[in-house]
Image (tube, grey):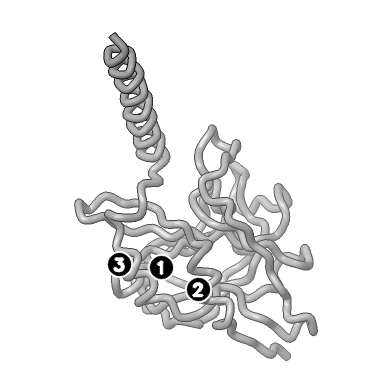
Amino acid sequence: MRWRQYLLVFLLFLTLVMGNCLLFDYFKEQQGMLFGEDLNLDSIRQDMVYFPVAESSFDPSGYQVTYADSYGSARNFGGDRAHEGCDLMASSNRRGHYPIVSISDGVVEKIGWLKLGGYRIGIRSPHGVYFYYAHLNDYFREFAVGDRIEAGEVLGFMGDSGYGEEEGTTGMFPVHLHLGIYLNDKDGREKTANPFPFLQELEKKKMRFYFE
Ligand SMILES: [Zn+2]
């Protein structure tokens, strides 16, 4: 009779494990967070050249930024959704000072105001990675969709734009760069990748600018 009890416990265990896996997959899918085996993360490494925030002569400290692995954590504005990216926080909360540079070569795919992203620019790299830079204070020059961009080119300056119905809203949160990395899986569905490990790899690839 013992073996029946064992079988029962085993079946219960199997049900729980499988149920959890299915549930977990479901949530990952809901949040657009499926990444890993079906994403070719090499394409990110092939195209990334520079850390997205340059050091600048505005500040002798070099305008250090801090960032944490907050990928997937909850965000409340505009309904519940996962944080699809990484926030690089300014050590000094001053908008319009930290230069934001393009991580990769590429082509401007999106430009202009977004309610959530503020002044943003989206650049598609040669291997098809979409780098999304949000909350800029201003753009370095006038960009248009289709413009060619070189890695290290200044895109604009870090700010706190966004989270407002009206274009130009600022002051809703501290100055920071929101960086998102998107790429398509083998079935052509857009997925997000966690920028954190790539930012860490780029730590030693910071540009430095001297402004008059
Ligand atoms: Zn963010």
Does residue 111 appear left or right of residue 91 in this picture? Answer: left
Asked whether 148 or 4 is in front, the reply is: 4
Q: CA distance from mark 2 to mark 3?
A: 23 Å
Q: Which mark is residue 123?
A: 1
Q: CA distance from mark 1 to mark 3?
A: 9 Å
Residue drawn 33% across the image and 13% down it? 5
For numbered disc 1, what is the local secondary structure?
strand
Residue 204 in sight in this render:
yes
Q: Position of residue 50 (x, y in %)?
A: 51, 79
Q: Is mark 3 within 8 Å of ligand 1?
A: no
Circle nearer the viewer, 2 or 3: 3
**Relative vertical location of residue 156 with respect to residue 183 in this rendering, above or below:** below
Inspect the image, locate mark 2, and give the three-letter code of the amino acid beneath it: Glu
Crowding at dot 1, Cα within 10 Å, few <14 / some 14-19 / many 20+, comes out as many
Q: Position of residue 115 (x, y in %)?
A: 54, 46
Does residue 177 appear left or right of residue 13 in this picture? Answer: right
Question: Sequence order check: which comes first, mark 1 or mark 3?
Answer: 1
Circle nearer the viewer, 2 or 1: 1
Q: Which mark is residue 142?
A: 2
**Relative vertical location of residue 73 with respect to residue 194 in this rendering, above or below:** above
Does residue 44 appear left or right of residue 171 in this picture? Answer: left
For numbered disc 3, what is the local secondary structure?
loop
Label tally: 3
Residue 145 in sight in this render:
no
Inspect the image, locate mark 3, and give the three-letter code of the amino acid beneath it: Gly
Q: Is mark 2 within 8 Å of ligand 1?
A: no
Crowding at dot 3, Cα within 10 Å, few <14 / some 14-19 / many 20+, comes out as some
Question: Sequence order check: which comes first, mark 2 or mark 3?
Answer: 3
- Which of the 4 image quadrants contains residue 100? bottom right
Question: Sequence order check: which comes first, mark 2 or mark 1?
Answer: 1
